[in-house]
Image: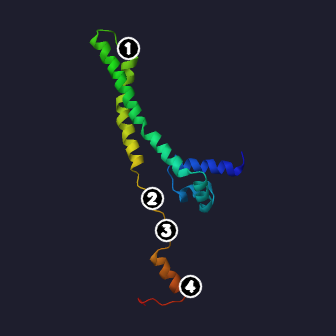
Amino acid sequence: MAKNEVLLSNAERLYVVDQLTIEEVAQKVGVNERTIRRWKTDHKWDLKKEQYLSTKTMFHEELYNFARKLMTSIEYDIDNNEKVDPGRMFAFTKMLPLITKIKEYEDGVINKPAKEENKGITPDFVKLIETEILGMKTSEE
């Protein structure tokens, strides 16, 4: 695998799976932000990120449905005076706390506030440029 391919796949993983910003990805991978932005567009990272989050957020529902089926089968055995397999009962009791933890995690990932990207220079920096570089006097002086 070529060096760029390794960097690209690593950057994609950081952006899609680890939910890092472009700036953070560029810093961790050691590549210019423009390159990361180009890769993001060319390889449709936003779509991949959306797909990743949608599949990840459904896991708690699948686990819940599985636990519900397991509970129903255990309940059926109890109602019919049949022996309940201890392994099924153990699995069910271990699964219940996980459902709420996974749900909380998924809600946190979905509702994670997006970090604001710098869209330019700050007003303080503009004043500094005007006074120090351009030699302009501001009205405050």
- Going by the numbered disc 4, the residue's amino acid type is Ile
User: Circle 1 — which element?
Assistant: loop
| Residue identifier under label 3 | 119
Single out the mark in the foreground, 2 or 3: 3
Name which of mark 3 and mark 4 comes first in the sequence. Answer: 3
Q: Residue furthest left?
A: 79
Where is 50 relative to 84, above or below? below
Image x and y of residue 38, in percent: 61, 58
Residue name at image x 42 percent, y 37 percent:
58
Q: Disc 2 to disc 4, how far (Cα)?
A: 31 Å
Q: Are marks 2 and 1 in contact (CB under 8 Å)?
A: no
User: Circle 3 — which element?
Assistant: loop
| Residue identifier under label 4 | 133
Q: Disc 2 to disc 1, how far (Cα)?
A: 49 Å
Q: Quadrant of the N terminus?
A: top right
| Residue identifier under label 2 | 115
Name which of mark 2 and mark 4 comes first in the sequence. Answer: 2
What mark, if any, has residue 10 been given in the picture?
A: none
Asked where in the image residue 95 lies, by quadrant, the reply is top left
User: Circle 2 — which element?
Assistant: loop
| Residue identifier under label 1 | 85
- Going by the numbered disc 1, the residue's amino acid type is Asp
Name which of mark 2 and mark 1 comes first in the sequence. Answer: 1
